[in-house]
Image (tube, coloured by chain):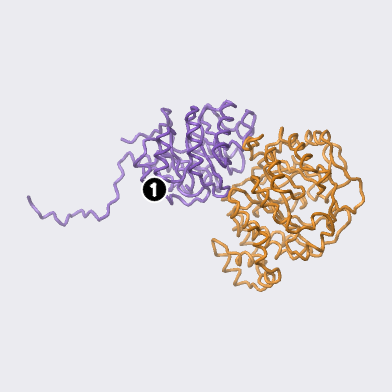
Amino acid sequence: MFKNELIIDNRKFKSRLMIGTGKFQSNEIMKQAIEASGAEIVTVALRRVDIENPEDDLLKHIDTNKFLLLPNTSGARDAVEAVRLARLARAAGCEPWVKLEVTPDPYYLLPDPIETFKAAEILVKEGFKVLPYINADPILCKRLEEIGTVTVMPLGAPIGTNKGLKTVENLKIIIEQSNIPVVVDAGIGAPSHAAYAIELGADAVLVNTAIATAGDPVKMAASFKLAVEAACVARDAGMPTEKQYADASSPLTGFLRD
Amino acid sequence: MSFYDEIGKFNWSEVKEFIYSRNESDVLNVINKNTLSLEDFATLLSPAAESFLEPMAKEAHRITLQRFGKTIKIYIPMYVSNECVNSCVYCGFNVHNKFNRKTLTLDEVKRELEVIKKTGIKHILICSGEHPKKVSVDYLNEVVKLVRRDFSSIIIEVQPLDENEYRVLYNSGVDSLALYQETYNTDTYKEVHLGGKKTDYRYRLEAPERAAAAGLRTIGIGALMGLDDFRVEEFFVGLHARYLMRKFWKTHVTVSFPRIRDAEGHFKPKYLINDKNLVQSMLALRLFLHDVGLVISTREPAELRDKLIYLGVTQMSAGSKTNPGGYAAGEEEGKQFEVEDRRSAQEFIESVRKKGFDPVLKDWDSSFINAV
């Protein structure tokens, strides 16, 4: 039976929705949206915060007793930079969890698979719980799993595009093959996209732009919460599988007898 | 191949003729497209497109919101020198203008930084006139070392440098470059740059490429609006931005829209650029290049800046003084140009907040750069 619980590296989370903190019009709205989303994992770009300063405007809006603050390395162009940022976050007192982003392309922030893998190897050896953001590449996912990352985070579509699950065929393979949680990250632009990812079997989704840039971010966060929960219940109920041919309620061969 | 070769494929007069030949039905066709060609971009810069600024603005706002969210990145300039070897007819720092010239000592830089630090803004733009001896790479390096203690992002707006010089500054902590070609028209360029190294059109044009090759993360380009026909100038700005984005795919490109302001020497621009012209340029750029950063400085008045926030701008300066020592010593003399938005940094930041946008004071960390 499908449990409505996400487990990453033995740590349990009730919500399968993770939330990003970029693009919000204010930290107050961001805080309200996080609350409304029911998320327990909140990712923050290290370059946006003064990590050593608890009075940092963004950090003080996130209750770290309630949420797992997941620093991300966005802005890092290669493995060396990403590793350096992760170490800085840990040195400043963050838990050794890191969303690894190595995105040399500053526009669509597409991940560099080679540098991401290199950085993941180093960080895992140093004891980090690494959640790597990657393209929806099933082989890369297996390689990352083998070296000890605690999730894989394949993209549904390029960041900020709101286009939904454009990588769905690869996501299906990744979900089928993975022994660690699969978190669909990037591209999710509507609650229905998030629900679809969970229905497909993803363990969680990460959403930022769709919530932050909505007309009412708090209401949108709440709707994502409902959508993810609905999809979880649907999975629990046993999703009917897709079939190639229609399954007639009055079978054509029903007249045959043994 | 550099952008110099790329721009050589285009003829100024032909581009101009094309832009002025566009009609309203051409514009309508472009507005309904998702991806714009160079010709489409030129069409949006045409006089015919002026009737479509409202739908262009709505689309520009939508795209900007999607790509950047409700955020405005804030930076603050620090002028370290008004000494210059160039004779540019439009610039207050023109070598022939008579006023007290000054390059800040490192102690004076420290005093400026103490005041600037209090604004909370972590992105600083180091500006100077172009005087390679007084404002040498060694001098800039010393300034950068002081600046990086308290600021996360360092942008330089100084004379064009060689690639190895950019690399030295990058390794010290400079992450961004702002360098405007002023005009992309080679004839006009000659007319307004009468002396000094700046007369070398090509060396300036290729500087953003040298900086990107040296590792700098953000490259800001632009034309000084008023030196030539803005429609053609902005076409070449867009061409340049697209070239840089494609060739240096790891580098973020920003575009500025500086309009000529009154300055020492009181140059009267040949072309008057009104607010509508400025807005059309911004909107066309945003519709052409969805992810380019659009920058509006305190050259523009407060009321206009407040309205531009909804039209695609992503970065704005705040509380600017355009003369060396302007913050700590409160000196007024030796400005590069007159600032129009005279609000303090705090007032401006608050105004951005009130409009429902997040004024981003830090969006970079010097720890990205190895040597720092």
The quarter holding residue A173 reads top left
Residue B342 locus on image (x, y percent):
80, 46
**Can residue B246 be seen in the rendering of this structure?**
yes
The amino acid type found where label 1 is placed reads Asn
**Can residue B280 be seen in the rendering of this structure?**
no
The relative height of residue B104 versus residue A11 in the rendered view (above or below) is below
In this rendered view, identify the residue nearer to me: B35 or B131: B131
In this rendered view, identify the residue nearer to me: B149 or B361: B149
Label 1 secondary element: helix
Residue A114 locus on image (x, y percent):
49, 42
Toward the left, the furthest residue is A258
Colour for chain A in the figure: purple
Which chain contains the residue that carries disc 1? A
Give the quadrant of the N terminus of chain A. top left
In this rendered view, identify the residue nearer to me: A189 or B12: B12
The quarter holding residue B3 reads bottom right
Task: Tell me the residue that label 1 is attached to.
Answer: A170
Colour for chain B in the figure: orange
Residue B103 locus on image (x, y percent):
85, 41
